[in-house]
């Protein structure tokens, strides 16, 4: 029903109620005296005007009729309702702002909803860029994703050669965003330019770091990744996923910016080596595919900061090999396959790290005896390098260098408790291994630098690698610089001095030594344990024109869950995208939050409406004639009782 609303200073006796059909001689508002010219109405108008000018919230007093509820209490309740409404508006405004980013304007990144994994949508992107942020620099690889109907589930085509950046990502820790941008944006731009222009905004980037960043403190890594994320989001045009309102900075397996561990790096390299060698790894877990090819190849990867060995023994193809009953049968996906692969990574065993430690130890030993110059075996003859104020002079003694390297590796194994010798079902069974990164760079250098080349390359025995390295290491530095600078694309001028040391490290890592006097560990020495005359190792940079690097395996691991119909995509953050539309617009945390706020506002309303309280919605009942001359509606205030 309609009730009169008492105004400040009014009383029920001041509002005249005329008999039905008679409203002060008028028929336009039955039952109400709405004559604006009555003395009572004029007095009420003056009082309401005075109260409104002195108390901006006084209007709330006319909206509640609870006995004992003062104006301050009523004001607080209605202010709570207003605040809830404003918060709800802010939530939806933020939603609209986020959606505006999805258009990918100009040179900034394109964003997706926080609940979306870009690779797990209904349409997998046509291209992806993976960056290897290694110890010696960054390398960007651009892949085209070609879906398949059955086997293979998809193919990855490398678009051109990798784009190189000479600045190691780890060296950018603590630098300004502008410095980070100067180091990585040109490389990223070139990598993205390989993608057709109309598809660049939908191309995701995954910039993952290895051992060089792995050794940094966690806090330093977080700050570095935050800087990289800001730079990429503001100065490139890649498609980036969002997590919890921000870029993917947490270190999970599908983040855009993260530090991968050594076992991941090795497994990715193994996937790439097998896929490029004709083994279909994209159909793992598919019902219409064989479990895993039985003739997989192994992978050896030595970089600047770490070394890895990876292989899948035949005995583990249908079992995890750990006595776990749950691991029997064909692997359901690549994650389960990884648990069956023998993969070992040795952080700190890479060329840069071992060389740096050995040089520092030599300088410290010289200082301890008061010497300012000392001869080291692991450098070209006559090559000088200053370390901590001590001049290290190359002696070119390869055999002595190998022995020192083995002693350093033995010390690392003892310190870390990580013996390197691979089990018998991994090495020595005839499994073909593809050796990548430093192992290839060294052997290819020897092949093009030595007059007669490297015997047997690219399937040289370890003994042949040792012999070639011995010749190179015994060369005078001036002659080596004159003859070999620039002859190998993978041996830059600043890396040429290290090729003597590289030969000793590769030899020590592969063969393993002969006992404690030679740096052994009581179980046959350091190293992986390959026979020195084996031809199971092939040194490769590419297979069928594609780079054999872990970045391809990383791309496979990102694409595989979607293309193979893996439960990983259904169980991942992409669930809301698959159920709620391709852009996630029908789901998401914003709607949940908004609903909770709405429910909270309703609860507040119920409390306001509590027992003994009437809530009125004010209205104006107009008089006939509409608006008065000079403005303002002709009528009397009234209300609906709720």
Image: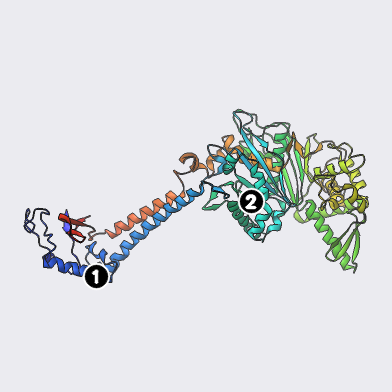
Element type at mark 2: strand
In-front residue for pair 103/284:
103
* Vertical position of residue 212 compared to residue 313: above or below: below
Residue 130 in percent (x, y) is at: 66, 44
Element type at mark 1: helix
Q: Residue at x 30, y 59 (%)?
A: 607
Mark 1 and mark 2 in contact? Answer it, CB < 8 Å: no
Q: Quadrant of the C terminus?
A: bottom left
Name the residue tied to disc 2. 258
In-front residue for pair 500/293:
500
Which color scheme does this rendered protein use? rainbow
* Vertical position of residue 128 compared to residue 47: above or below: above
Q: Residues within 10 Å of mark 2 (few under 14, many from 20)?
A: many
Asked whether, in this view, residue 486 is left or right of residue 250, the answer is right
Residue 572 in percent (x, y) is at: 54, 43
Residue 221 in percent (x, y) is at: 65, 57
Q: CA distance from mark 1 to mark 2?
A: 62 Å
Marking on residue 51: 1
Question: Closer to the N terminus: mark 1 or mark 2?
Answer: 1
Quarter where residue 392 is shown? bottom right
Asked whether, in this view, residue 210 is left or right of residue 63, the answer is right
> How many circles with numbers are drawn on the protein?
2
């Amino acid at each position: 029903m309609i009730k009169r609303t008492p105004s400040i200073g009014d009383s029920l006796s001041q509002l005249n109620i005329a008999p039905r059909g008679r409203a002060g001689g008028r028929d336009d508002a039955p039952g109400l005296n709405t004559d604006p010219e009555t003395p009572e109405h004029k007095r009420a108008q003056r009082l309401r005007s005075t109260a409104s000018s002195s108390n901006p919230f006084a209007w709330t007093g006319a909206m509640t009729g609870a006995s004992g509820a003062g104006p301050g209490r009523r004001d607080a309740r209605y202010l709570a309702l207003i605040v809830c409404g404003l918060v709800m508006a802010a939530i939806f405004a933020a939603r609209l702002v986020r959606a505006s980013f999805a258009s990918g304007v100009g040179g900034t990144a394109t964003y997706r909803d926080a609940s979306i994994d870009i690779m797990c949508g209904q349409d997998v992107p046509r291209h992806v860029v993976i960056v290897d942020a290694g110890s010696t620099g960054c390398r960007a690889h651009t892949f085209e994703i070609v879906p398949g109907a059955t086997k293979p589930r998809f193919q990855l085509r490398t678009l051109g050669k990798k784009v190189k950046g000479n600045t190691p990502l780890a060296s950018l820790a603590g630098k300004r965003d502008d410095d980070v941008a100067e180091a990585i944006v040109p490389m990223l731009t070139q990598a993205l330019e390989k993608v057709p222009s109309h598809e660049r905004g939908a191309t995701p980037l995954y910039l993952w770091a290895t051992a060089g960043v792995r050794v940094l403190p966690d806090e330093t890594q977080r700050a570095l990744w935050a800087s990289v994320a800001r730079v990429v989001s503001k100065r490139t045009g890649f498609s980036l996923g969002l997590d919890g309102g921000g870029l993917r900075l947490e270190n999970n397996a599908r983040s855009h910016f993260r530090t991968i561990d050594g076992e991941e790096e090795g497994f990715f390299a193994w996937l790439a080596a097998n896929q490029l060698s004709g083994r279909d790894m994209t159909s793992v877990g598919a019902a219409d595919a064989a479990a895993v090819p039985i003739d997989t190849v192994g992978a050896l990867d030595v970089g600047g900061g770490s070394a890895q060995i990876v292989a899948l023994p035949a005995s583990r193809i249908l079992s995890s090999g750990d006595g776990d009953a749950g691991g029997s049968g064909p692997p359901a996906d690549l994650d389960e396959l990884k648990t069956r692969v023998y993969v070992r990574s040795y952080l700190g065993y890479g060329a840069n790290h071992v060389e740096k430690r050995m040089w520092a130890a030599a300088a410290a030993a010289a200082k301890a005896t008061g010497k300012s110059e000392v001869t080291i075996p692991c450098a070209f003859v006559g090559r000088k390098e200053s370390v901590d104020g001590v001049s290290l002079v190359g002696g070119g003694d390869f055999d002595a260098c190998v022995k020192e390297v083995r002693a350093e590796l033995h010390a690392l194994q003892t310190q870390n408790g990580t013996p390197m010798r691979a089990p018998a079902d991994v090495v020595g069974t005839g499994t073909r291994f593809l050796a990548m990164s430093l192992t290839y760079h060294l052997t290819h250098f020897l092949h093009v630098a030595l007059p007669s080349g490297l015997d047997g390359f690219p399937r040289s025995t370890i003994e042949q690698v040792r012999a070639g390295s011995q010749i190179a290491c015994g060369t005078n530095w001036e002659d080596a610089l004159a003859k070999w600078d620039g002859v190998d694309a993978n041996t830059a001028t600043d890396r040429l001095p290290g090729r003597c040391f590289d030969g000793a490290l590769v030899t020590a890592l592969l063969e393993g030594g002969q006992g404690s006097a030679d740096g052994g560990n009581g179980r046959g020495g350091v190293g992986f344990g390959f026979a020195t005359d084996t031809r199971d190792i092939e040194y490769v940079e590419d297979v069928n024109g594609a780079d054999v690097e872990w970045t391809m395996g990383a791309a496979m691991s990102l694409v595989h869950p979607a293309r193979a119909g893996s439960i990983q995509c259904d169980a991942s953050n992409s669930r809301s995208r698959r159920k709620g539309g391709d852009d996630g617009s029908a789901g998401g945390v914003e709607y949940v939050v908004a609903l909770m706020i709405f429910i909270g506002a309703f609860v507040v309303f119920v409390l306001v409406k509590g027992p003994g309280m009437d809530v009125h919605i004010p209205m104006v009942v107009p008089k006939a004639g509409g608006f008065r001359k000079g403005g303002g509606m002709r009528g009397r205030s009234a209300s609906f009782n709720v």
